[in-house]
Amino acid sequence: MIRFVLNVLWLIFGGGIVLAVGYGIAALICFLLVVTIPFGVAALRLANYSLWPFGRTLVPKPGAGAGSGFANVLWVVLAGWWLALSHIVAGVALCVTLIGIPFGIANFKLVPAAFWPLGREVADLP
């Protein structure tokens, strides 16, 4: 029940909708170019995760090989480092206030997803 409440508050006050829309737009742009479709899939995964982060985590995807590692390096160079940095800055800013600490923690959870998204999948916590 607490996860549901935190997720609803995240949607309203924590920026979940804004993050999901931003990642969704990035996914659409990636889908326009055939070569960047795997990055579009990763951006949709990030949109889904950023929309409802509490009670979920990232786990390694079985069967992800060297291709996802190479694509992750390309992702880090092009977009991952500034996405991760923006989540760190937002997390620190939210943790300054007592009420914003859970939202700051959610932003910190999004850092590894934004930095290295390929070869991982979002799973529900037990």
Image (cartoon, grey):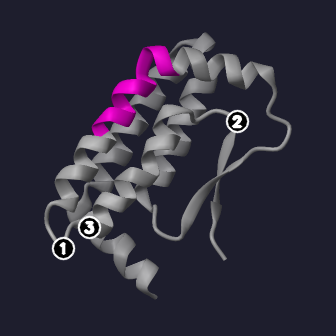
Dot 2 falls on a residue whose secondary structure is loop
Question: Residue 79 in magenta?
Answer: yes
Q: Which residue is mark 1?
A: 99
Q: Earlier in the sequence, mark 2 or mark 3?
A: 3
Dots 2 and 3: beta carbons under 8 Å?
A: no
Question: Residue 111 in magenta?
Answer: no
Dot 3 falls on a residue whose secondary structure is helix
Instruction: State left or right for residue 31 relative to residue 93.
Output: right
Q: Nearer the viewer, residue 29 or 19?
A: 19
Count residues near mark 3 (Cα–Cα under 10 Å), then give few for <14, some for 14-19, many for 20+. Answer: some
Instruction: Measuring from the top left, give residue 119's x and y in whole percent.
Output: 70, 36
Count residues near mark 2 (Cα–Cα under 10 Å), then give few for <14, some for 14-19, many for 20+. Answer: many
Instruction: Measuring from the top left, give residue 59's x and y in whole percent.
Output: 68, 52
Q: Which residues are magenta?
A: 76-86
Count residues near mark 1 (Cα–Cα under 10 Å), then give few for <14, some for 14-19, many for 20+. Answer: few
Residue 119: give its label. Answer: 2
Distance between the Cα atoms at labels 3 and 1? 6 Å
Q: Is residue 101 above or below residue 81?
A: below
- Dominant SS type (magenta): helix
What type is the residue that disc 1 sits on?
Ile
Residue at image position (81%, 27%) is: 65
What type is the residue that disc 3 sits on?
Ile
Residue 101: give its label. Answer: 3
Residue at image position (68%, 16%) is: 70
Distance between the Cα atoms at labels 2 and 3? 29 Å
Q: Nearer the viewer, residue 104 or 120?
A: 104
Q: Nearer the viewer, residue 10 or 80?
A: 80
Q: Quadrant of residue 17?
A: bottom left
Q: Is residue 96 above or below residue 98?
A: above
Dots 1 and 2: beta carbons under 8 Å?
A: no
Q: Earlier in the sequence, mark 1 or mark 2?
A: 1
